[in-house]
Image (tube, rainbow, N blue to C red):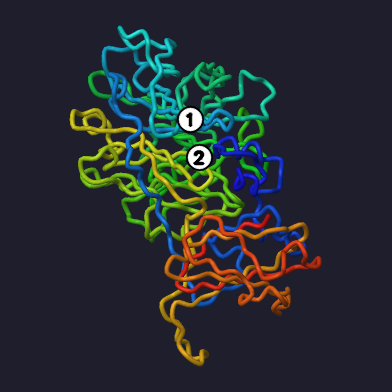
Amino acid sequence: MEWAAMNGVHGSFSTTILTVGLAMTAIGRSAAADDGGPPVARKHTLLMVDDRDILYRAGTERVFVPARKHDASPVVSEEHVWEKAIGWTSVSRNPETGIYQLWYQAYAGRGHHPKTHDCVVCYAESPDGIQFSKPKLGLHSFNDIADTNIVLIGNGGYGDRYGNAVIVDPREPDPAKRYKMAYYDWSVRDGREFAGLHLAFSPDGVRWTKHPGLVYPTAYGARGMQPPRDGEETYFELPGKNDTVRKRWVLPNTMSDAADVMFDPVRKRFAIYGKLWIDGPDGSMGWKHAMGRVESADLLHWTKPRVVCFPDEFDLSVAEFHTSPVFWHSGRFYCLNQILDRRKDIGGIDIELMVSHDGLDWERPFRDGRFLARGEPGSFDSGSLFTNATPVVLGDEMRFYYGAYGSTAIGGGEAIEGPRQRSGVGLAILPRDRFAGLRSVPVSDQPTLKNPLQDTGQVTLKPLDFTGCTDIVINADAAGGEVRCELLTEDGYRVPGFEKENGAPLKKDAIRFRLSWKDRKIAELPPASYCLRIHLKKATLYAVTFR
């Protein structure tokens, strides 16, 4: 496929596989990286989601583009007795067969089944990513039902098994571990039960083998307590209801119960982004969830957690980050951050798009909008949305699968498994690379202009080394207007023959429009660094690809 070839891979692909498969290359890095000279333009796609690759711009404004929910949503719905609530998801598309594999959490609630089956991982697949089937696998029964689509059950500990972040690793030398799943569960370490990260491995995404034991522990039940002094006991037992014992693991600065795993191609390490409790105004634990990160070379040995982003004074006081899955695309880290409103009656989870250049320092330029918003009252996704780190990138579109409840994610019980509850897996679509764009403003009337300008703007990119570059392709919407491009020298002079008047204009909406000039070709340029200037007339620019 032509577009995939531009980005240094072959054919359509799943982002899960892409992030691992391209980890050993430099293709994905930002073209604006400071490496001592103008970066090479070839094999880079620059997205207009921020100004990192822009020298300056005039007469333009940035516009945010939310994803559009597909009419087929939900593509997976509650159907079986173990599916009282469907939540977390992970998805991968096989680039060779085109088959979609979907893993989703199904909550059965408390019942006559074993505790190991309260919260399970289920499997579905699809030839087109829209019509999913739930194969009867015969791996795990549910009460008297022997043949189910359940692929993983819990350990049956103090609390529930939780989450199912799957990554497909084509670099893995052991075929039995090509599929890797990170999830939260309970197990015993050094004679004491802990909650925390667990792993499972599979050769095909269906037959899973749990890695023995706990990978790292997490806090549990520590809300409102002050952090223990160094060296103090961190485990407490308190009387609960009906002669039960309530247990607390008071461990400061640990990840929490959701783990979204991705491969960081910048550091060439696995990374988990997820909930990390931060302390409150009085220093007590369990105040709000922030965005935490840990990383590992082998999935087994992890760094200490670090806070990389947290709710601030510009968020609602009742808002926090539920969890924060991250994926890598075209030189940026993107997060589909779950913004949780904790108000029980009207609260829920919407999705905010965040951006980072290094995976550590995060920008929130679109907090006034929602990349995905809750649906209409009564819909399966009217309450809480659960994103993942595995969008599927196709030729002209990006697909985002998400789990959803029709209720809040807070409180459990009737809210999660009541008779009026609906849940499922939704699908949202974004045109390729159109997270945000730069459009010409309606009027520019600064005193420095001789005359006011209408619907006119320009974007000048930072200097790039055009060595080996043969074509430039833009992603822009010029329906009702036009886009013209020209080249400048690094010093700002127009390059003869590559002025905007000599270039073919774009006058339609196009994901891929190849720039051309009369009697001149990019490949014929003398070796040097150049600035590409894009002129917008009632138009919006989303991305530029150099090949």
Q: Quadrant of residue 201?
A: top right
Image-quadrant location for residue 299: top right
Q: How many marks?
A: 2
Q: Earlier in the sequence, mark 2 or mark 1?
A: 1
Report the residue that reaches farthest toward the right. 527
Looking at the rendered image, the quarter that the C terminus falls into is bottom right
Classify mark 2: residues with Cα within 10 Å, few (<14), some (14-19) or many (20+): many
Residue at x-position 43% and y-position 30%: 163
Looking at the picture, tell me which residue is in the foreground, 104 or 113: 104
Query: Amino acid type of disc 1?
Result: Tyr
What crowding class fits label 1: few (fewer than 14 Cα within 10 Å), some (14-19), or many (20 or more)? Answer: many
Q: Residue at the location (41% across, 31% down)?
A: 220
Q: Which residue is mark 2?
A: 392
For label 1, the SS is strand
Amino acid type at circle 2 is: Val
Q: Is residue 153 above or below residue 4?
A: above
Label 2 sits on a secondary structure element that is strand
Rendered image quadrant of residue 414: top left
